[in-house]
Image (spheres, helix red, strand yellow):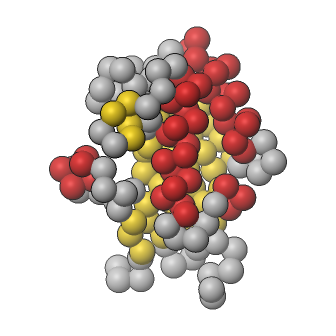
């Protein structure tokens, strides 16, 4: 599949587990892997709101590597470990994507690789002009 574009962020788990931060398909769809609030090997932001903002920024940075941004986002998924965090994570999503209004899901999971993490996000974006 040589017509795929793969993006790496340099996160250690990408090499360890064999995945790309993002993959752009020939049809213009860009899939961003699960992103957390780990920046430079450390968890940035302690609470669910801060972790959500940081995680989405990691995803948006990956989109930036293929020339896309927030306005190109068509779907988001938010994974949280506690129902009590719905409002905080939802508020972060609204602040970042209110004008864009992507399709979105918020799912409660049992936990993440690091128990200090309470949010993980996935983002999908679409490049409308695939001839570009």
Q: Nearer the viewer, residue 85 or 2?
A: 85
Q: Position of residue 123 (x, y in %)?
A: 55, 50
Would residue 41 appear left or right of 60 to someone viewing this image?
Answer: left
Residue at 67 percent across and 28 percent down: it is 90
Indicate the quadrant containing the C terminus: top left, top right, bottom left or bottom right: bottom right
Q: Nearer the viewer, residue 45 or 34?
A: 45
Q: Residue at x 34, y 43 (%)?
A: 40
The structure residue drawn at horizontal position 73% and vertical position 37%, both measured from the top left corner, is: 95
Residue 2's spot in the image, x, y percent? 35, 83
Q: Residue furthest left?
A: 16
Outermost residue toward the bottom in this view: 131
Quarter of the figure that contains the N terminus: bottom left
Image vertical order of residue 44 relative to residue 87, above or below: below
As drawn, is 18 to the left or to the right of 86? Answer: left
Question: In the image shown, does 11 or 20 lie closer to the viewer?
Answer: 11
Residue 36 image position (x, y, % from top left)? 43, 37
16 to 43, vertically: above or below: below
Vertical side of 62 occupied by 114: above or below: above
Q: Is residue 3 left or right of residue 88?
A: left
**Tally of numbered tags:** 0
Residue 131 lies in quadrant: bottom right
Q: Is residue 99 visible?
A: yes
């Amino acid at each position: 599949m040589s017509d795929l574009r793969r993006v790496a962020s340099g996160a250690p788990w990408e090499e360890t587990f064999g995945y790309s931060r993002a993959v752009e398909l020939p049809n213009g769809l860009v899939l961003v892997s699960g992103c957390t609030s780990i920046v430079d090997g450390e968890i940035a932001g302690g609470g669910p709101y801060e972790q959500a903002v940081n995680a989405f920024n990691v995803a948006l940075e990956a989109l930036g590597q293929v020339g896309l941004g927030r306005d190109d986002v068509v779907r988001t998924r938010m994974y949280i470990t506690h129902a009590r965090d719905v409002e905080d994570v939802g508020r972060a999503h609204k602040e970042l994507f209110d004008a864009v209004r992507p399709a979105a899901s918020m799912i409660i999971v049992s936990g993440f690789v690091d128990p200090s993490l309470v949010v993980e996000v996935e983002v999908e974006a679409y490049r409308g002009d695939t001839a570009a």
